Every structure is written in C-alpha cells, then in structure tokens.
Image (tube, helix red, strand yellow):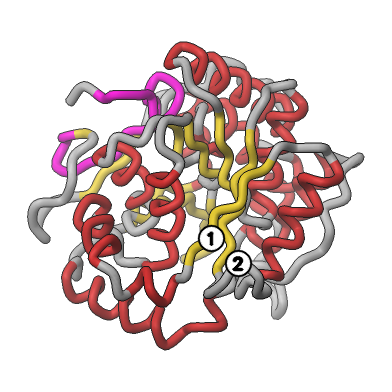
C-alpha cells in the first residue's frame, strides 16, 4: 500500500503478514513478518547514526511542512532521541504526558516526568505538557477506537497513541525502537514483538505523520547499535554464570553514556506511573488480550545473521 508518510527513512523497516507489508492482522493463522533495509554508512557510531537520523527526520518534517514533536517519557531511550536532535541542531518540542486526576496534583508518573522536566530545563528545550487520566481513559470509548486501529493489547502503549492523536498537525516522534537482544539456546537473538508494532500500526492507520520508532528510523542506527563495542563484548561473553545479563537492557545506560559522555544520564529505576493503578491497567489488558488473542508473534533473528542483513550480505536459508 502507498503510505501517507515515511514511518522510517524510505520505509526501510517493513512489517506485515504473509508477505503483505503494512497491513493489519486479519486472522490467527497469518504469519507475522519483518524486514529491514541495508545501512548506507556502516562505520557510524551510535551517536553519529542518531544525529544523521535526526537530520533525516527534520528533512522529512520540512518536506511535509510540519513541526517536530518528540514524546519525552523520562526514560533513557527518548532522552537519547532528544540528545540526537540537539546534536543535529534540529528544532523540536518535547511533549510530556502527565498522568493525573487534576492538573494541580502530583502526577502518578512523577518519577518519569521529573527526568523529562529536568532535561528540558537543562537544555532549554521547548516543552508541552499533556494531561491524561488513565483510569478514565481505560473506561472510555476513545481507547476502544484506538485499540481497533492499532490492534494493541496494551493500555500503556495506547497512552502514547492518545498523545500522538491529540497533537494534531505535527510530525510526531516516539523515542523507542532500540534493538532488543536476548540470549537463549546458547545464542544471542534480535527480537521484534508484534505487540510493540501496534505503535507503528496506529501511526499508519490513524494517519499520524512521523515515526513511532526513532531508534530504528534508519538501518544505520540499528547496525551502529548492534556493532557497538559494548554489545560485541556482551555477545562474546562466556557461558552464562549466575548474575550475568540475559539481554542488552543491562548495559543500556553504559552504552548511551559512552556516546554522550557530557550528558548526565541520571540513574533511574524503571517506573512507568502505571504502578499506581495496576488493577485498571490489568482489566483493560485482559479485555484486549481476549480480543486480540493471536497478536503476540515474535520475529527473531540470530545476532550475526541480523548484522549480515543490515550489511546487505547474503542471507542464510534458515
């Protein structure tokens, strides 16, 4: 199908079912598939690739005549996306979604918001606060409409979709999409989850202009991340001993800090704000899991094979 915008650069990242790209799932028997482009600059560092992606996003937004809005969650991935825009001198507005009943109360996701607010203050970034009461949202007709469009099984993910929808005529960037690696059966694997791709589906089918995956906007970014010395060291680590990491999340902050040493990536625990209303989140999640029971496929590629694909080398038959 012809897309209204480039979800990634030249739409290098493709997703779909049964060899049909950029479509929704129609039945449980369909095979979920993903495909990626070939990196043009295979010598980029993570920092260089991110800055290049930020520039390409700016060019696309300019082509469409739109201002850039970055959903800044307070987590490391969206903060690195913001740093990339700053490094590339690309103008943008940071959007912080605050979960609260009333605007004069402390947000339920205060732990995340404080990091996002501090970042904007430190680097003089223009920001826009959006206020959402997730409890009311989870009980609304609006979330049902968003779920139908995105085929999402996660109320939490749909809060970002709600924000993208509220921003209207802008170029909306979600600072996620960093490669996920895990160790199993004596090998390291790259993984893409169908559940997470519901963000892409919403951007596509709701007509949101922008990218829901900054960190995979170009294949150069993906290759730079997967080729990073810290990732290579992790991949080449000996057989697992007690306490050794099973995925790359354990070294994420160290990796980002190595490329942005002048940044104060404040140590932070992984919170989302949803800890404060888990029963409501669990209720909507259960309803969505029943409705979209088959939407949980995973696309997994052995680590070295994934490198070959991003480098454009001959693929294995497996």
Residue 290: where, in percent of width, then height?
A: 19, 76
Q: Is label 2 in a helix, a strand or a loop?
A: loop
Task: Tell me the magenta residue range.
Answer: 3-20
Can you tell which of label 2 and label 1 is closer to the viewer? 2
Residue found 72% across the figure and 22% down from its top: 88
Few, some or many residues within 10 Å of mark 2 (<14, 14–19, 20+): few
Residue 214 shows in this picture: yes
Mark number displayed over residue 39? none
Mark number displayed over residue 103? 2
- Answer whether labels 2 and 1 touch (C-beta < 8 Å): yes
Residue 23: where, in percent of width, then height?
A: 18, 40
Asked which quadrant contains residue 54, the reply is top right
Residue found 81% across the figure and 37% down from its top: 124
Which quarter of the rendered picture does the C terminus lie within?
top left
Residue 4: where, in percent of width, then height?
A: 28, 24
Mark number displayed over residue 131? 1
- The image shows residue 198, relative to residue 92, as above or below, that is below
Q: Is label 1 in a helix, a strand or a loop?
A: strand
């Amino acid at each position: 199908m012809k897309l209204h915008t480039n979800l990634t650069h030249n739409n290098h990242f493709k997703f779909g079912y049964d060899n049909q790209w950029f479509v929704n799932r129609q039945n449980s028997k369909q095979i979920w598939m993903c495909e990626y482009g070939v990196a043009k600059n295979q010598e980029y560092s993570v920092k260089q690739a991110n800055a290049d992606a930020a520039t390409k996003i700016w060019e696309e937004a300019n082509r469409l005549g739109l201002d850039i809005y970055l959903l800044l969650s307070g987590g490391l991935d969206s903060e690195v996306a913001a740093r990339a825009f700053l490094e590339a001198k690309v103008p943008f507005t940071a959007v912080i979604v605050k979960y609260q009943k009333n605007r004069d109360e402390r947000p339920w996701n205060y732990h995340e918001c404080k990091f996002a607010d501090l970042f904007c203050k430190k680097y003089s970034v223009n920001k826009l606060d959006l206020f959402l009461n997730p409890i009311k949202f989870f009980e609304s007709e609006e979330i049902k409409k968003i779920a139908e469009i995105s085929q999402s099984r996660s109320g939490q993910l749909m809060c970002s979709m709600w924000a993208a929808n509220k921003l209207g005529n802008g170029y909306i960037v979600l600072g996620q999409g960093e490669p996920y690696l895990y160790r199993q059966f004596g090998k390291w694997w790259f993984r893409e989850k169908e559940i997470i791709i519901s963000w892409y589906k919403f951007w596509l089918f709701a007509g949101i202009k922008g990218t829901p995956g900054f960190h995979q906007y170009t294949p150069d970014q993906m290759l730079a991340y997967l080729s990073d010395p810290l990732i290579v060291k992790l991949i080449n680590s000996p057989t697992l001993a007690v306490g050794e990491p099973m995925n790359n999340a354990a070294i994420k902050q160290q990796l980002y800090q190595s490329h942005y040493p002048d940044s104060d990536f404040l140590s932070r625990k992984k919170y989302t704000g949803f800890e404060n209303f888990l029963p409501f989140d669990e209720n909507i999640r259960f309803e969505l899991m029943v409705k979209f029971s088959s939407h949980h496929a995973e696309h997994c590629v052995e680590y070295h094979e994934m490198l070959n694909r991003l480098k454009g080398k001959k693929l294995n038959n497996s």
